[in-house]
Each structure stands twice: as C-alpha cells, then as structure tokens.
Image (cartoon, rainbow, N blue to C red):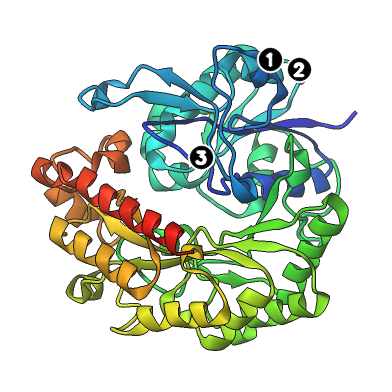
C-alpha cells in the first residue's frame, strides 16, 4: 500500500473574492512531484466551484460562471474577525462547506501527513480553520504549512495557525526533507531525476483551464511587489517544454483555455515567449490564452502583439499602475512616457478589440492622491484600453513596506488582516470615501466600450 498524503488548498476568508483563473499552482506542482515520488496523493481544494455536494444545499446560491472558466465562488457569510469588526461589509468564507471538507479528510485512512498551502497574508483565517479541522479528524498526523503567507509572515504563521511545521523553502525537494524529519520516507523515484512532472490538474473535480508558468522570478524590483523576495533566483523554462505541456493538456484533456501565471512573461521575449508563440503558430491549435498577472508595457512590440493575436490570446492585462510618472519613478520606473499608448496601439493594430485590453491601476498607495487615480483612469480610456482598479495591499519584505507602515492607521506589522486591500489601509478616510466615484467612472468607461463594439 502506498503512503498517503493529503494536500489542501484552504478557503478564502474575505469581504470579496473572484475566480480569475485562480488555482493553487504551487500546490498542484507539489502534488505532481510527490505523486511521481511514489506517494498516493489526495487533493482537497476548498475553493472547488464544481464540487457536486455543494449543489445539494438549497440554501446556497449557485456561483455565476463566466467566459473561459472564470466566475464566482461558493460563498457563506461568517462573522468578521475582531480586527475587522469596524468594517461595515459582509465577511464570507469562499469555497466548500466545513462539513464537506471534514468528510473529505475522514475518507483518507491513515495519511502520513497533511500539507497545506497559503496565498494572501490576510487570508490566514482559512488556514486556521483547515488546521483546526485537520487536527480534529487526524489528531496524530503532522500538518505542514507552506506557501506565500508562510514565507512572508513566518512568525505569525507559527503562532497563529498551530501547524506542526511552517516551511519557507519553496524548493520542492525541501518537502521531502521535512517528511523525512517526520519519519516519512520517499517511497520511490529519485527526486533528482528529470523531468519535473506537470502540475496535477487532473486531480481537480473539473478541468476548465490550465495555469502555465514559463518561469519564476522577475528582473524588475517594483517597490510594491515581493517577487524578488519569494523567488530570489529567477528561472526560465525551455519554450519547447512549455509548448509540450500545452499540447499535453489539450490532447489528453481537451483543455482550450490557458492562463499565464508568470511575473515577467515578456522578459527577453525574443528568446523566450516569441519562440513559444512561433511554435504555437505552426501547430494552429484552437486555443485561448489569458494574462491575469499583467504584462510589462514595454515588452508589447508590434511583432509580439501580432503573434499573440494569431495564436489565440483573448485576455490582455497590462501593468500600468499609474500614469503619474513622478510616482512611477518612485515605484518601478519600468517604462517611459508614450510606451503605454504605443503598446495599446500595437495590440489594436494586431487585431485585438478595445474590450480585450485591460490595464491594472494601483489604488491606495502611500502618498497617492484620489486625483492621480482619476487621471490614470482617464489616461487608460483615452489610450483605448479598459481600466481595472487594483487596490494596494501592503506586503512584508517589499521596498514600500516601511512607507506603508508609517502612513497607515492600522498596525500592519503585527496583524496581517490589516493588509486586506478592501481596507485601503494606506489611505485616509476622506480618500476612501472617494472610492465609489472612481468605481463609477470605470464602469462608465466599460459600458461605453461595450456599446462601441
């Protein structure tokens, strides 16, 4: 009998959550790796939109699903935690019920360990709940926590979650060492034997889309981003290997939608993304590609835009952040005046419609004015793209972290719940009151573009 491991993607506890190609890619890579090592893997996705038992509860509203596999999660309102009691908004657990999760745990007999991933720092209540129930069902089984929250808020995770072990090393082989420390030996397969298995998307209830990672790390050092801390050694996959993976999921499972998770997909594109796109163009597959993590504006050349259109890219998101270049030079200095308009023009010339081209606008930054955000919204609209507001969340180990601490009324250093972007924690109350006006203007622009096309 194989040694069993349970891998868990926790719930989201938040004021709002949306499934924008949201899959626990790191956990799925780990699942594929440990499966190849000889373990029997039981994956429990607490965010499973397609869990059949959730549809049996008449008290729950079925999530609305949209094009290309995106949409809403199952949602159940829960009490707000004490630090967030002052926020007059419903607070919810997104995902399957606790009863379904507990039942899924109990169906696995004698697991050797339970491995839990983490994402946003302020979603840790979902991890607390997972650990609590896991220890109730399997009281003598070690619970091992990893992921982004574990890496960014290690001390807090150790104190708060009650996991038996908190892992900050993101190398897959490090997990084998942790398991060995708990006297759980690797059943077979040398961990050094190539190739790295594909992420175990086949373990999901329904495979609507696949998330792709062509490389980790980022050459930029944006002051609001922790990529360089979490992935200090950038790595790029061979484009041919990425093409093989795309073909595998399409041929074996009929997948047509793929979302790129890269932080810097367009970096050194002539030797990387362009090679992949040329391979896709030769195959002429009927696929759709999406870029929810944003593309660097300066990387959108006429040739790249043309190839992206030819190979089936449908969702383009550009990382603008702000049109205020005095602020840009302080944040990232990734491009110059005129680069954004040129990028949008290249995309439109290649054949993309206005509604396919979106631009993320950071809102709630330290020392950012409401007027600056409104100017950026108008700038994006005038350039021919759709603005998407992205509320700033303070992140430990970023260059902007100390600025955030100094300007926020919240105790960001000791309570990750205050990192929640819904709070706009680095803006004053008078600025927060202007948020509805900014959102209304964005909505007007989107409606205008729908009528135009």
User: Is 4 rendered above or below residue 230?
Assistant: above
Helix, strand or loop status at disc 3: loop
Question: What is the quadrant of residue 339 in the picture?
Answer: bottom left
Marks 2 and 1 in Cβ contact (< 8 Å): yes
Out of 310 and 209, give the one closest to the viewer. Answer: 310
Spatial separation of the CA atoms under disc 1 and disc 3: 21 Å
Q: Position of residue 213 (x, y in %)?
A: 63, 62
Quarter of the picture holding the N terminus: top right
Spatial separation of the CA atoms under disc 2 and disc 3: 23 Å
Residue at the spot x=63%, y=85% of the render? 271
User: Is 67 rendered above or below residue 316?
Assistant: above
Residue at image mark 2: 107
Q: Position of residue 310 (x, y in %)?
A: 67, 77
Residue at image mark 1: 103
Q: How many marks?
A: 3
User: Is 232 rendered above or below residue 207?
Assistant: below
Q: Is residue 302 left or right of residue 407?
A: right
Residue at image mark 3: 118
Disc nearest the viewer among 1 and 3? 1
Q: Position of residue 226 (x, y in %)?
A: 39, 58
Spatial separation of the CA atoms under disc 2 and disc 1: 6 Å
Q: Is residue 444 left or right of residue 197?
A: left
């Amino acid at each position: 009998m194989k040694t069993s491991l349970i891998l868990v993607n926790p719930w989201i506890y938040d004021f709002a959550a949306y499934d924008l190609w949201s899959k626990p890619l790191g956990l799925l890579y780990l699942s594929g790796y440990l499966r190849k090592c000889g373990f029997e893997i039981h994956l429990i996705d607490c965010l499973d939109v397609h869990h059949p038992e959730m549809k049996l509860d008449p008290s729950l509203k079925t999530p609305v699903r949209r094009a290309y596999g995106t949409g809403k999660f199952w949602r159940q309102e829960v009490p707000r935690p004490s630090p967030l009691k002052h926020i007059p908004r419903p607070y919810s657990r997104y995902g399957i019920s606790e009863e379904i999760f507990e039942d899924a745990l109990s169906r696995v007999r004698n697991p050797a360990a339970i491995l839990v991933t983490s994402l946003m720092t302020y979603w840790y209540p979902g991890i607390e709940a997972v650990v609590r129930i896991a220890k109730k069902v399997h009281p003598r089984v070690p619970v091992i926590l990893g992921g982004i929250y574990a890496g960014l808020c290690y001390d807090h995770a150790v104190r708060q979650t009650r996991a038996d072990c908190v892992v900050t090393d993101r190398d897959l082989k490090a997990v084998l060492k942790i398991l060995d420390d708990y006297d759980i030996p690797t059943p077979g397969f040398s961990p050094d034997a190539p190739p790295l298995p594909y992420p175990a998307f086949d373990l999901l209830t329904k495979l609507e889309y696949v998330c792709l990672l062509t490389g980790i790390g980022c050459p930029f050092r944006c002051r609001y981003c922790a990529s360089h801390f979490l992935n200090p050694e950038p790595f790029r996959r061979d484009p041919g290997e990425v093409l093989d993976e795309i073909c595998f999921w399409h041929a074996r499972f009929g997948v047509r939608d793929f979302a790129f998770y890269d932080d810097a997909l367009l970096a050194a594109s002539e030797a990387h993304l362009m090679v992949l796109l040329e391979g896709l163009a030769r195959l002429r597959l009927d696929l759709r590609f999406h870029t929810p993590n944003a593309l660097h504006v300066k990387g959108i050349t006429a040739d790249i835009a043309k190839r992206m259109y030819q190979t089936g890219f449908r969702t383009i998101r550009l990382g603008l952040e702000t049109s205020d270049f005095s602020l840009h030079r302080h944040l990232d200095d990734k491009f110059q005046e005129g680069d954004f308009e040129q990028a949008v023009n290249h995309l439109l010339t290649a054949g993309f419609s206005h509604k396919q081209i979106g631009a993320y606008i950071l809102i709630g930054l330290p020392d950012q004015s409401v007027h600056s955000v409104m100017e950026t919204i108008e700038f994006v609209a005038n350039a021919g793209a759709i603005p998407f507001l992205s509320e700033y969340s303070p992140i430990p180990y970023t260059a902007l972290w100390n600025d955030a601490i100094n300007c926020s009324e919240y105790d960001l250093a000791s309570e990750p719940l205050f990192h929640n972007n819904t709070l706009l924690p680095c803006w004053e109350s008078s600025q927060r009151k202007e948020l509805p006006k900014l959102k209304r203007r964005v909505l007007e622009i989107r409606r205008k573009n729908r009528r135009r096309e």
